[in-house]
Image: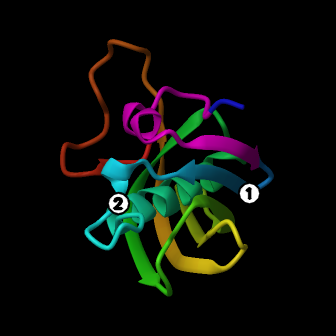
Amino acid sequence: MKFGVDIPFVNLLGFELVLFEGGHSEIHYEAKPEHCNSFNVTHGGACMTLLDVSMAVAARSVDKEMGVVTIEMKTSFMQPARGKLSGKGRLMHRTATMAFTEATLYDSAGSACAHATGTFKYVKRLPIGAKSAIPLNVISTD
């Protein structure tokens, strides 16, 4: 299954899209050694990226032609993330321009390792090569 767009950072991390429909997403990820911290567990930044992308994909799943940019994200870490991880996102509420989402990161045993909520703005995609309509101070999860 494809994300619908090329996301170089997601490709670099090796995320695998499993579910992308109806306001829900699921993404699998197994950290490489270079994605771990000094405790030999998945780095919090990689975990936050998985949560961010899981929420963005859930938001996009109801209108796959639109892009989204992260406006706000809050993350709580509950336990170290080890082994193959799964990020499960859910669109909680949508307006014409905004998406309110949540995602949980699970380890291979099914235990919750981290949880996030996020707000995303829907943006139109431009043709390849066109100048970006996204301000430089906005972080895109696409």
Residues in magenta, as a range: 3-20
SS for dot 2: loop
Residue 6 is one of the magenta-drawn residues? yes
**Residue 137 image offset from top left, x and y in percent:** 19, 51
Instruction: Decide: is 59 above or below 134.
Output: below
Instruction: Decide: is 49 above or below 118.
Output: above
**Residue 36: mark in rendering:** 2
Residue 81 relative to residue 90: left or right:
left
Residue 12 is one of the magenta-drawn residues? yes
User: Which residue is depicted at the point 67% across and 79% down?
Assistant: 111
**Residue 56 image offset from top left, x and y in percent:** 54, 53
Q: Nearer the viewer, residue 59 or 135?
A: 59
**Residue 1 image offset from top left, x and y in percent:** 72, 31
Residue, disc 1: 23
SS for dot 1: loop
The earlier-in-sequence mark between 1 and 2 is 1
User: Which residue is depicted at the point 65% across and 55% down?
Assistant: 58
**Residue 3 image offset from top left, x and y in percent:** 61, 34
- Exactly how many numbered labels are in the figure? 2
The picture quadrant where one finds residue 40 is: bottom left
**Residue 105: mark in rendering:** none
User: Which residue is depicted at the point 65% across and 30% down?
Assistant: 2
